[in-house]
Amino acid sequence: MPKNSKVVKRELDDEVIESVKDLLSNEDSSDDAFKKSELMVDDQEEKDVDVEEGSDVEDERPAWNSKLQYILAQVGFSVGLGNVWRFPYLCQKNGGGAYLVPYLILLLIIGIPLFFLELAVGQRIRRGSIGVWNYISPKLGGIGFASCVVCFFVALYYNVIIGWSLFYFSQSFQHPLPWDQCPLVKNASHTFVEPECEKSSATTFYWYREALNISSSLSESGGLNWRMTICLLAAWVMVCLAMIKGIQSSGKIMYFSSLFPYVVLLCFLIRGLLLNGSVDGIRHMFTPKLEIMLEPKVWREAATQVFFALGLGFGGVIAFSSYNKRDNNCHFDAVLVSFINFFTSVLATLVVFAVLGFKANIINEKCVIQNSEKILKLLKIGNLSQDMIPHHINFSSITAEDYNLVYDIIQKVKEEEFDALGLKSCQIEDELNKAVQGTGLAFIAFTEAMTHFPASPFWSVMFFLMLVNLGLGSMFGTIEGIITPIVDTFKVRKEILTVICCLVAFFIGLIFVQRSGNYFVTMFDDYSATLPLLIVVILENIAVTRIYGVDKFMEDLKDMLGFSPSQYYYYMWKYVSPLVLLCLLVASIVQMGLSPPGYNAWIEDKATEEFHSYPTWGMIVCISLMVLAILPVPIVFMVRRCNLIDDSSGSLASVSYKRGRIIKEPVNMEGDNTSLIHGKSPSEVPSPNFGKNIYRKQTGSPTLDTAPNGRYGIGYLMADMPDMPESDL
């Protein structure tokens, strides 16, 4: 016959009281604070709290002030310098408007699904990258550490680019602009144009000689460039001050740093469309070359651009989303931010080629004038007959169309002797086909075009201020990808960690402001992130879909969002995205193997770039960057696999006592079946309530155990609580 419920309750209450007595009898006699504390119970609702080691205060996890602030943060992180100086180059190189087709397809296949995945796990678990992947599987905790290492490597050289932009910004407050004309050199007898500048161009000379004062090779250090050192220091001070309070300080700056670039791009687009030749640039840009679209290289480069444009694998996406409420519609956020990123790239492409079309038109006009003068000289000396020239041609005001007509006639008549005449075909398309990207676009080509703008200093100030803001938005996400996981995992003060991180990064970053620093920027850009991030994202996909379970993850999303996400994501995560990522990884390795490792060195005497192979020590550095970035993954796996760290694994629950309240800590349970939604993350576990939760002692568990943090833990679990997730590293 079943026992009376009151009898059962009395027996259970007696067992709880006896268990608490056992705990108190085994306490450390020297722990006075523990003696004075008492077990308190309350009926408070669950709250998300972060308990800092050694602190008597439970600090609530920071949260975004508004949804707009969060969206601007994610947009600022994903929309960076690559949208302005990488996407237009790829679009021009890979078929013009036709390139948008593979880019959009790959955005739907790997971009949005993987971006959604990172947003969802960060928002649900409310931890940085280290805590998130430890939560899902401690053996894959190295994924988070690898993300932090890659973020640190990228931050080192990315802030150098912000420093370069700050330098050009500071030099833009003068008229004429300092890169408008080649400098004159005086000697004892006469004045002449600087030979290095005369052989190249004013903007090219200013970039390599005045700004960078670049050396001739990677091995030739040349000492520090003091002006760039000051600019780098200023860049790190800006980042440190903006990040020192986390999202509470950087979130407010996002309103300016994320929105200002759009204002500048729209102003440049309107101004550019009013310039002569801008339509030629845009027409050239979006004229589709469908045959190029079928080449595998186009799809590989489109996939790489999608991957890096959204900031996948860096940890910044996870860190930002971890400050959201758990019922936030992260699916809407993923789609919105992805398409804002895409349309920003298209807008930047319109701006770049409107301005480059204007620049090409100016260069073409100069070409026509110079070659028309050559033709007149050839007519005077009798090398060309006047009968060749159509009667309506007036060389004093010749147009590009008339010159091309004369050029074609001379070429047909003087077939064998034509090359000796030294005439050039002045075609705008030839100038537009000279593909430039990266620093070559921002600091040389675009800068040269702006010198021809009316009120050029104003446009120069706006352009480089835009670059600074684009860079800062990405830097905030990158630094957040370092700070948030470390603070969540090791419970250090965010302010101190931010200052230390920025100081260390500045001193390491001094290698980038040597005279050979530009070559190190190229090295880090090529080798520190590409392969490690691909491996990180592949492991992220495997962790969620294979280890945690894609079916369970879809259920979690339904509980979190309030609706079931499309089955499209199920098939993308489980089958398509991993396959595409593996193909991209293999293609990247093959491409890296086929391309000789090296860099373009600036040769002062020739005033041109030459390709140099990396020296032996340079190759060692390149390999070390890739190995160091991915090394945390196997190290953490082996540490967990071999149980080299005593983290009180097993079935024991760890209970921390602080200010009279029981704080339930996570437990390491292999094969844990708890879903992300129904399982409790470390930040949301409520204080036990004796009036609602019934405790029972686990069979075979010791009465007392020492938790990893030195606090007392005991083998008691709430009978009506689901299994706890695996413990943090």
Image: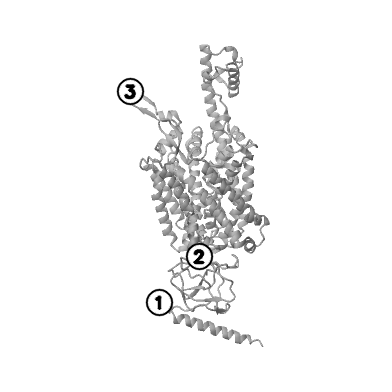
Identity, as a three-letter code, of the amino acid under mark 3: Ser
Indicate the secondary structure of the residue bearing disc 1: loop
- Numbered label attached to residue 31: 1
Which circle's residue, 3 or 1, is located before the other in the chain?
A: 1
Query: For mark 2, what is the residue?
Result: 728
The crowd level at tag 2 (other Cα within 10 Å; few <14, some 14-19, many 20+) is many
Residue 144 lies, in percent from the top left, at 51, 58
Could you tell me if the residues under marks 3 and 2 are in contact, i.e. CB atoms within 8 Å?
Answer: no
Q: Is 408 left, or right, of 467 in this rendering? A: right
At 48% across and 82% down in the image, what residue appears? 22
Nearest to the eye among marks 3 and 2: give it.
2
What quarter of the picture does the N terminus occupy? bottom right
Query: For mark 3, what is the residue?
Result: 189
Which circle's residue, 3 or 2, is located before the other in the chain?
A: 3
* Residue 26 in sight in this render: yes
Identity, as a three-letter code, of the amino acid under mark 2: Asp
The crowd level at tag 3 (other Cα within 10 Å; few <14, some 14-19, many 20+) is few
State how far apart marks 3 and 1 are (Cα). 88 Å
At 63% across and 39% down in the image, what residue appears? 293
